Image (cartoon, rainbow, N blue to C red):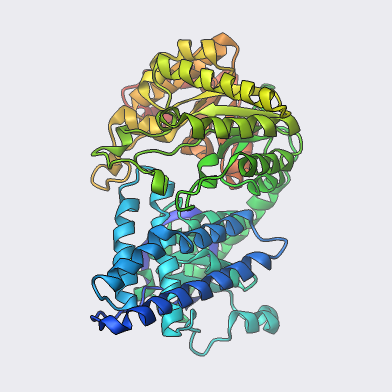
Amino acid sequence: MSFSLHGLAVARGIAIGQAVVVINSRTEVRRYFIEPDQVESELARVRAARDAVVAELQHLVQDLPADTPPELGALLEVHLMLLQDELLMGGVRPWITERLYNAEWALLTQLEQVARQFDEMEDDYLRERKADLEQVVDRVLRYMHGQELLQQPKGQLSPQASLADGADAPPLILVAQDLSPADMLQFKRSVFAGFVTSVGGKTSHTAIVARSMDIPAVVGARAAHQLIRQDDWLIVDGDAGVVLVDPSPAMIEEYRFRQRQVALERSRLARLRHTPAITRDGVVIELLANIEQPADAAAAVQAGAEGVGLFRSEFLFMGRAGQLPDEEEQYQAYRQAVEGMQGRPLTIRSIDIGADKPLEKHGRDVFLNPALGLRAIRWSLAEPAMFRTQLRAILRAAAHGPVRLMFPMLAHRQEILQTLAQVAQARQELQAKGHRFGPVQLGAMIEVPAAAIMVDYFLQHFDFLSIGTNDLIQYTLAIDRADEAVAHLYDPLHPAVLQLVAQVIAAGQAAGKPVCVCGEVAGDVSMIRLLLGMGLRSFSMHPAQLLAVKQEVLRADTRKLAPWAAQVLRADHPAEVLAHEVA
């Protein structure tokens, strides 16, 4: 019987094939108390399992194929860091030595403790890293129990055998509760045409890797791994976030037609890679990429980005058990990213860390409302030695290519002055040591309403501005994006949000200084024409979104869009005006 499952559309396209269901849920663990003389043997079991999984992942990292998406290698490194982090593995010891839990029970108990910290994180991307933690533990437990990863489909050749069998073998679609980066790497060279997971969000690693591999995927389709059986025929609609199970022949034919249309559209988009992003009325638009790791720079260039509009530097600091990267390590990482851009500008955001995402041993007291606590630039200014270490590394990397440096969550005059003073001091320290460094353009992120309202003051001190729409929407509307009860109120088309964005863009134009949008709306094709009409000329997004956005730019005429955008801004219900868009 046919039925449908609904989840989140995270990688566009359509896949049709048979289901391969992966056993990937945490093993049912026996819980029992051990005798005191068993403590050392239980600790040894945990260490041996951890070491075996570390060795396995290190082997995968060392043997990464040349065409592996950089996101996949970076996520494997995250798993390695989590495995070697004392917060997880070191925390298991007291449960065994003091409570006398057996090894598996102790490991799951510590997982629950650490997972709560992830649940309290404000940042969507970081909160979803809890899935990485769960998968690390799952992999250790599987090793301890000697279990295999895959349950092969009944009566179906393995993916590797299917490849050898040629075109007669049907495409396969991977179905799991969740997928780890190591799982994804193992499946990369198979015939999997799509992915379906029961959990995950738009910034989960499965979503990130699926986008980078350009494979249709639906995540967060609850209970998919329980409701879908081995060999079931599936249609994965990565555009709508829908999975059709056991579809009728007529439905399959309809979606195969849509597949052909999607293939033609992608072929057309690929031809735009080297086409300048210029509107029909001759306005040049800057299309930039968002990246997380230095190795991502090459992928951004390959996707046709004119530069990087957001390098999230905090990922160099995370999962290190409090052992933060020193100046030399950071310098080498930033230099790698600069050189990977091949002369294109690299915009580095200073560390965006804080009360909601503390750096392990550097963590402070837990705040009742972490979104309003000591985070982002507030954290950096509270840790000036750490901040200047990062600033010196970035300034040194700027000697190798064009670098822009921007600061998150600025809101106060004093914060601006203190930040600029720290940059000046970092330069003086480099001069005193005789280190070579380069010029850096300085920018501010507009993420809180206060910054948008006092934008003219910001423009007196900074060379450029970048609007972080994700946080700006959250703070303007007082919406916790992590709270499902109010998530429906998170609205980029709210009149107050649009007014603030328009105000910042207009102020930048008046001052002759560039303004970029680097939040989710920059890669949302339904928002591009409105932002162009509002005067935005610089967009930064995930590399996989670049060509679709470029197509919107090439079709746009800003002379016609400007008066229409003004109508949207005046409207009480902007979404209704947006629906009647100009040609």
Q: Position of residue 192 (x, y in %)?
A: 58, 71
* The one of 534 and 420 positioned closer to us in this rendering: 420
* The one of 199 and 102 positioned closer to us in this rendering: 102
* The one of 364 and 76 positioned closer to us in this rendering: 364
Q: Residue furthest bottom?
A: 155
Instruction: Kindly tell me whether residue 354 is visible in this rendering.
Output: yes
Left or right? Give the position of 2 relative to 436.
Answer: left
- When asked about the image quadrant of residue 443, the answer is top right
Q: Position of residue 260 (x, y in %)?
A: 62, 60
Q: Residue furthest front?
A: 37
Q: Position of residue 58 (x, y in %)?
A: 60, 67
Left or right? Give the position of 262 relative to 146.
Answer: right
Relative to 218, is 225 above or below? below
Left or right? Give the position of 451 relative to 278.
Answer: left
Q: Quadrant of the C terminus?
A: top right
Residue at 66 percent of width and 61 percent of height = 68
Relative to 146, is 561 above or below? above
Q: Quadrant of the N terminus?
A: bottom left
Residue at 47 percent of width and 53 percent of height = 319
Q: Position of residue 538 (x, y in %)?
A: 59, 27
Instruction: Kindly tell me whether residue 13 is visible in this rendering.
Output: no
- When asked about the image quadrant of residue 167, the answer is bottom right
